[in-house]
Amino acid sequence: MAAKRGRTKDFEAALQKLRGEDADISEEAAEIEDYIETLERLPKAKVLDLFQRRYLRAVIIGVGLMVFQQFGGINGIVFYVATIFEEAGFSSSIGTITYAILQVVVTAIAAALVDRAGRKPLILVSAVGLVMGCLLTAVSFYLKVHDLAAQAVPILAVSGILLYIGSFSIGMGAVPWVVMSEIFPINVKGVAGGFATLVNWFGAWAVSYTFNYLMSWSSYGTFILYAAINAAAIFFVIGVVPETKGKTLEQIQAAINS
């Protein structure tokens, strides 16, 4: 903020404090000032600008990841996880506590891996796990509806939900936000990020609103639907999403538009 307002001394003092008294900040300070000057020279972007050919592919990637993140069922499952466990014949309190602990642990692991394993592999592993989790849960509800293998229903349901939550936490939960922050040119980053976030929140509302209706329609069919969406996410990531780890914006843009 100080750099943007032209308060160079305050900006450099703050950066020096952040990096340490013995750190050489000259190169980083010059890069930040150059970035700000470049940003101020560029025209302010509008939402309609996002649909220009040069930005469209990045917008498809950012928005697409948000669509798959939400429409894969996460908010419906999270908001109604206790109900899901109860309907499957498992203790909702034990299931919810286990789910919460797993989510925290796996998210911490994902944070450590995102700059080592890369963004794309984590999302792919996550999506595969989401498909498997949905299918396990779907099988459990299918067995329950048709009064088959009653003893296996709670085990399959809990295994499926925990696999789903763990898989979401390892990649699809946080990594799309990381990718989104890296793929947009600086002049449209704010508008594009806001648009993708709007799509994300609309998806969160839509999935939360429709979950009970879908479960009333078909409990196992609901999870088969989510499995299909997460399977589509795998093909989307393989075919469209670039790896952004360790790359400059210019390199990412070249990969996107190649």
Image (cartoon, rainbow, N blue to C red):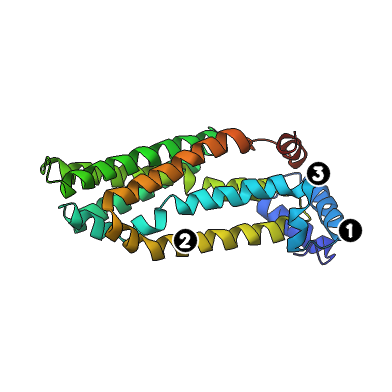
Question: Is disc 3 in contact with disc 1, using a CB cutoff of under 8 Å?
Answer: no
Residue 20 makes an appearance in the image:
no
| 3 or 1: tag closer to the N-terminus | 3
What residue would you read off at disc 2?
Answer: 204
In the displayed structure, does residue 26 sit left or right of residue 17?
A: right
Secondary structure type for disc 3: helix
Q: Nearer the viewer, mark 3 or mark 1?
A: 1
In the displayed structure, does residue 102 sit left or right of residue 154?
A: right
Marks 2/3: CA–CA distance: 42 Å
Question: Is disc 2 in contact with disc 3, using a CB cutoff of under 8 Å?
Answer: no
| 2 or 3: tag closer to the N-terminus | 3
User: Picture coordinates of residue 160 (x, y %)?
Assistant: 28, 43
Marks 3/1: CA–CA distance: 21 Å
Q: How many marks?
A: 3
- Looking at the image, is 9 positioned above or below residue 144? below
Say which quarter of the image contains residue 132: top left
Marks 2/1: CA–CA distance: 36 Å
Secondary structure type for disc 2: helix
Q: Amino acid at mark 2?
A: Ala
- Looking at the image, is 57 positioned above or below residue 12? above
Residue depicted at 64% across the width and 60% down the height: 195
What residue would you read off at disc 3?
Answer: 27
The image's mark for residue 73 is none
In the displayed structure, does residue 150 sit left or right of residue 203?
A: left
In the displayed structure, does residue 114 sit left or right of residue 190?
A: left
Q: Amino acid at mark 3?
A: Glu
The image's mark for residue 41 is 1
Q: Nearer the viewer, mark 2 or mark 1?
A: 2
User: Picture coordinates of residue 83 (x, y %)?
Assistant: 24, 60
